[in-house]
């Protein structure tokens, strides 16, 4: 058994999604103080461990379908590089890590972690087979990360943050679905699987456009909200709308014109224009929230 197989099974590259935990502190103007608190890091570690548990359980339940998928067939469990016993042992270790972290957490956080785990177990063993419900469940997992981050940093989370995070997460999940459909369409071996999918290219494409447009409108409402202007102590925060629009339009161009990967995570870390849009957006927040 190779250490690389263990690491690949944990999916550490997906831990970036757990950075949503830090958003309440960032938007609340208290990120510096929060980063020095052990509660927020214990929450981050717990979600990383639980997300790996969910990925392993999904891999175990999806072995037959993964073995005929053009890319998923190379995953350690589907390819046989990681044995069943090793995968179960890894799950046990990660659960013990979560329990150790929970020992130092308030009950409110442990309930959120428990709900996250059971929701994802329900997803793995049934909900993922129900169209629309599957993507909503995954997106709601990001809302739970936000809620846990608010509890850990002792910050009251804005309704705007919950709404925008849910819509953004829904766009991420739909992008992943679209990516899978593109891969299956390119591989003749996946033709039957594509025909049997819960989604098709046209619906997923339209859903991505709808959700991303809705999230942009919500952000615009947030950026011009009078309470937000008071919090940031500026009447010019609406300037941050520009990099958001740039990022969304660039995403559409990459996916629908240049036929690049629809995974926003891949695009956000590889495309120079998207990276620039994210940096500009982040700079707006840092300036108005922390330096203004």
Image (cartoon, rainbow, N blue to C red):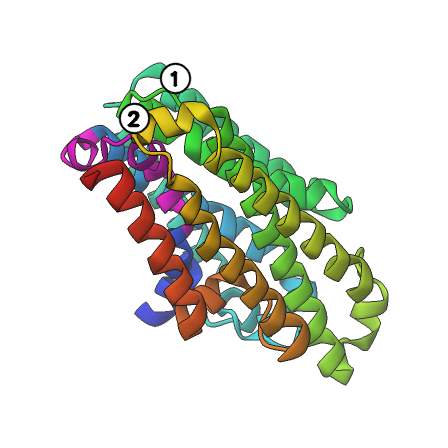
Q: Is residue 179 above or below residue 20?
A: below
Q: Provide the major secondary structure of the magenta segment.
A: helix
Label placed on residue 157: none
Residues 215 and 67: in front is 215
Instruction: Measuring from the top left, give residue 149's x and y in whole percent.
Output: 35, 31
Q: Is residue 19 magenta?
A: yes
- Indicate which label's residue lies in the foreground, 2 or 1: 2
Picture disc at residue 152:
2
Residue segment shown in magenta: 17-38
Label 2 residue SS: helix
**Above or below 258: residue 241:** above
**Residue 169 in the image: x percent, y percent?**
55, 46
What residue would you read off at disc 1?
108
Task: Give residue 10's position: percent from left, percent from top.
Answer: 40, 57
Residue at the front extreme?
235
85 within the magenta span: no
Residue 27 placement (x, y as % from top left): 34, 34
Name the residue rendered at 32%, 48% in the picture: 284
Rendered view: 278 above or below 70:
above
Of the 4 image quadrants, the one containing the N terminus is: bottom left
Q: Secondary structure at mark 1?
A: helix
Quadrant containing the C terminus in the rendered view: top left
Q: Residue at x 80, y 69 (%)?
A: 194
Q: Earlier in the sequence, mark 2 or mark 1?
A: 1
In the shown orientation, is residue 216 left or right of residue 99? right
Q: Report whether 186 appears left or right of 278.
A: right
Residue nearest the viewer, comparing 60 with 34? 34
Q: How many marks?
A: 2
Label 1 Cα crowd, 10 Å radius (few <14 / some 14-19 / many 20+): few
Q: Who's the residue at 63% across and 36% down the image?
A: 122
> Label 2: few (<14), some or many (≥20) within 10 Å?
many
């Amino acid at each position: 058994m190779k250490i690389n197989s263990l690491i690949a099974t944990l999916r550490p590259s997906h831990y970036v999604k757990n950075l949503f935990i830090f958003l309440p502190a960032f938007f609340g103007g208290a990120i510096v103080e929060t980063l020095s608190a052990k509660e927020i890091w214990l929450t981050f570690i717990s979600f990383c461990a639980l997300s790996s548990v969910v990925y392993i359980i999904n891999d175990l339940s999806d072995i037959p379908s993964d073995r005929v998928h053009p890319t998923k067939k190379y995953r350690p469990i589907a390819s046989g590089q990681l044995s069943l016993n090793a995968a179960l042992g890894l799950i046990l270790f990660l659960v013990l890590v979560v329990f150790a972290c929970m020992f130092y957490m308030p009950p409110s956080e442990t309930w959120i972690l428990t709900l996250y785990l059971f929701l994802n177990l329900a997803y793995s063993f049934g909900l993922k087979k129900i169209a629309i419900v599957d993507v909503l469940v995954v997106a709601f997992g990001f809302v739970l990360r936000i809620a846990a981050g608010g509890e850990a940093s002792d910050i009251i989370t804005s309704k705007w943050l919950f709404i925008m995070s849910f819509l953004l997460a829904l766009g991420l999940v739909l992008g992943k679905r679209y990516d899978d459909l593109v891969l299956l369409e390119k591989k003749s071996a996946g033709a039957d699987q594509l025909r049997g999918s819960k989604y098709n290219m046209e619906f997923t494409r339209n859903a991505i456009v709808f959700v991303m447009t809705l999230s942009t409108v919500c952000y615009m409402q947030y950026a011009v909200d009078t309470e937000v202007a008071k919090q940031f102590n500026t009447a010019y925060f609406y300037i941050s709308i520009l990099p958001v629009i740039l990022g969304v339009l660039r995403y559409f161009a990459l996916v629908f014109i240049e036929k690049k990967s629809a995974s926003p995570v891949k695009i956000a870390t590889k495309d120079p224009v998207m990276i620039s849009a994210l940096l500009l957006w982040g700079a707006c927040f840092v300036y108005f929230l922390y330096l203004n």
